[in-house]
Image (tube, rainbow, N blue to C red):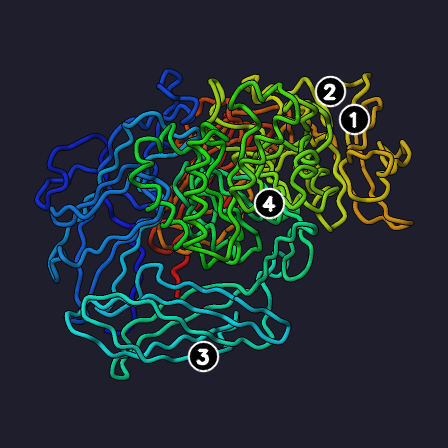
Amino acid sequence: MGSRVIMPFRTDWKFIEGNYTGAEKTDYNDEHWRNLHLPHDWSIEKSFDPDMPYGGNQAYLPRWSVGWYRKHFNVKPSSPKQRVYIQFDGVHSNSEVWLNGHFVGKRPYGYVSFQYDLTPYIRWDEENVIAVKVDNTLLPPDRWYSGAGIYRNVWLIYTDYLHITEWGTTITTPAISPDEAKVSARIQVSNHHEHAVECTIMTEILDSQGKVKGKIEKRLTLAGLASEEMEQEIRVLQPELWSPDHPVLYEAQTTIYCDHTEVDRYRTPFGIREVILDSQMGLLLNGSSLKLKGVCIHHDLGCLGAAYHDTAMKRRLEKLKEMGCNSIRFAHNPMAPELLDLCDQMGFLVVDEAFDKWKSLSYEHVFDEWWAKDLEALLVRDRNHPSVFMWSVGNEVENQGQPSMLHMLEQLVAFCHEKDPTRPVTCALEPHNTPISLRDGPIEAKVEHTKLLAQRVDVLGLNYQEQWYEHYRAAMPDTLILGTETFPYYRGQGNRVKGYLPLNPWFDVANHDYVIGQFVWSGIDYLGETSYPSKGWSSGLIDTCGFRKPVSYLHQSLWSDQPVVHIAVFHDHMKSEYNPTWTMHWKSPAMEDHWTFPEYVGKLIRLVTFTNCERVELIVNEESYGERKLSDYPNHLILWELPYTPGKIRAIGRNGSQQVCEHELITAGLPHALKLEADQTILPADGHEISHVEVTVIDQQGIVVPNQDVDLSFELHGDGRILGIDNGDLTSDEPYQGKGRRTHRGRCLVIVQSRDGAGELLLQASAGGALQGEIRLKMEEED
C-alpha cells in the first residue's frame, strides 16, 4: 500500500440535538439533520439560561441533552491488506460510536483522545455510515464550561496490515552532552496478518531543516496476529537543545519495509533537552537554572466555546509569550493535541494534568473502571512532547491527606512512573480543608499533614499556600515546591489564604531556589465557575477576546527580560464586573490603561506604573512629576497620586542614563468611526481557517474611545460566516452567535471563518448609522 494516510475527517457531518431511537442504523433517515463541519460545540450556540441547573459551572449555556452526529463516506482500498482507524481527539462526553450499525466502542471521559479500528465493519467501495451519540445528561458536570459534542478534531487513518501501533513510539534522550545525544526509540509494531512477517525497521532522525542526523536499521520477524516492541538507539552529533527561548525540534521518522517495499511510515516530533530537579538548586533545564513563569488555562476559546481552533489558541499563546510567560499548566484535563504541538513550537513548558476530582463531580461515575485507561491515554499520547516536563494526576481532590486519598495518589503516581519513568509527577493540593480543623489550626499541623502528601509525589504542587512554603521546606529540606495555582495580585498571610497583601506570589518563587515556579490562576478568562449574571471567571490576565488587561503588565514586569513600562489607572467608577464574593482575592484593584476620565477633572487620580526598569519618570502634558526608583517599591508597584488633567500622560523607563522604554496614553474625544483590524487578511479557502477582527470605537485622531460603549451590528458579504462575537464582558447576556454586540471599553471581537472556494469577504460594522467601519478579507485557494 505504501505509507499510512492520515486524513482530516471533519467536513460534511450531520447533527441533531435530542435522543433519536435507531439513529445508529445505516438506513436511518438523516436528511432533515443539520449539515456542519467539526470541531463543533452545540452548547456555545445557545442563549443563556439563568435558571439552568448547575448553570454557574457551565456558563448558563444549556447542554443537558443528547446529540447525534452521522457521516456518510466512501473508502476505496489501495491494497487488499489495508486497515482503517478513526481517531477522536475529544468528544464531550459519554460518546458511543457505531459503523454501519455495528457498535465500535464507548468513551465516557470527554477530554481524552481515542482510536477505534473500523476495519471489521468497513464496506469497501460502498457508502459507509458512522454514527456518534454524545450524552451530556449525567450530573453533576465539571466545575467549568466543558462544551458539548465532537469539539476537537477527528481523523481517518489508513495503514497496512503491518504497521506501528497507535501512539506506538516512545522517544527518550538518556544521555546528552554538547558533542552528542543518545536518542532511544522504542517502537511498537502490530502485525494483523495471520502469518509471520519479516521486515526491516529503519528510524532516521531529521533536524528542523529535514537533514538526516542519524539512522539505524533493524530486522524483525513478527509472529502472526501479534504486537512487539523493539528498541533502537541513535547518536545525534552536536545536538541543538530545546528550551523555551530556543524551541528547536527534531523528528524521528520510522519506516517499515517488507521485501524492500515501504509499508508504513510514522513521524514523531521530539526535542532534545535535559530536565533535572535538584533538591537544592531547583529546576535545571540543559544545565541552567530555570524558573517557571506560568499560567493555568482552561480549554474554552471564549465565543468559540470548547470547539478547538489552532489559530485561536495560537493567538492566545502569543499574548502569553509577550508577557514573558514560559510555562502552562493544563487545567484540569488533557487538552487538544494541537495545543501541545504549539507549546513545542513556541517554547512553553507544560504541566500535563489528567483529572480534576477523582471520586466526586463528573468523574465519580467512571473513576474505578476508567482511571487507568484514561491516564494511559494521556501518557502515551503526550510522552514525546518536549514541552511536557511533568505529569499531574489531579487537582484539589476530595479527602486530601486521608488514607483513601493517599492510597489513590500512590496508585496514580506509580502508574505514571511505570508508563513514563522519565518525568516527575505531582498533584495540585488545595489549602488545608480536610479535616476542617486544619484550616485555622497551627502551622505544625499543616506541616505534618503536608508531609504525608509530599512523600507520595516527586514535586510538591501547592495551590495558594505561598505563606507556608518556608515552613514546609524547613520540615522537608529535600522537597521541591511548585505553586500550581497562585493569585494574580494579592498574597496570603498567616492562616488567611486570602490575606489581601498586595505582594505578588512571584516573589516567593524568586526568593527561594527550592520553589521552581508559579502558575497564575488564571492566564485567560474562561467560561463557567461563576454565578449569574456573570458567565465565567473574569480574574484572568487576558480576557475572553484575547485582549490583555492592565494586571498582565505587572506580570510582564516580573517575568520579561525586555524593558517594559506600563501605566494603569485605579478607577473605582468603571462598570463593575459582577463576581461572587469568594472570588475577590483573585481580582486586582479595578484598573484601566487609558487617560479618558472626565469624572476626575479637578480631582486627584491614583495610578501605578509597572516596570522592570531602574527608574520611571511620569510626565503629564509636559509637566514632569519626577522620577521614582523601582528599588523603593519592593512589591514592584510604583504608586502615584496627581490631579487629573486631560491630554497626554507618559511614563519613561530608564536604566542608568538611558531611556529604554516608554508608555503613552492620550485622552479620547468623541466617537467618530469604527476601526476594524484583522490578524489575517488573507485566508486559505478551506472552509476552516479563521480571522480575528478587532473592532474599536475611535475618535477623529484614531484614539480608542473607552467610555462610550455603543451597540454594533455586523454584515458579512461573500462566502464566509461569522463564527462568534465577543466583547470580553462576562456579565453580558448577548449570545456569542449572531450579528450584533455592544462594545466593552470601546471594543469587541468578531471571528470570521472562510468557506470553500476563492473570493473576497467584506465585513461591515455600524452603530445605528452614526459610526461606520469595514474590512476586506481575501480567500485564496492553496497550491
User: Which secondary structure, mark 4?
Assistant: helix
Quadrant where the C terminus sits is bottom left
Name the residue carrying label 4.
Answer: 319
Distance from the alpha carbon under mark 1 to that under mark 2: 8 Å
Query: Residue 315, percent across and down?
Result: 53, 47
Name the residue carrying label 2.
Answer: 598
Name the residue carrying label 1.
Answer: 646
Distance from the alpha carbon under mark 3 to that under mark 2: 70 Å
Closer to the N terminus: mark 4 or mark 3? 3
Distance from the alpha carbon under mark 4 to that under mark 1: 30 Å
User: Which secondary structure, mark 3?
Assistant: strand
- The amino acid type, in three-letter code, at marker 3 is Lys
- The amino acid type, in three-letter code, at marker 1 is Pro
Alpha-carbon neighbours of circle 4 within 10 Å: few (<14), some, or many (≥20)? Answer: some
- The amino acid type, in three-letter code, at marker 4 is Lys
Q: Is residue 674 visible?
A: no
Query: Residue 16, percent across and down?
Result: 22, 35
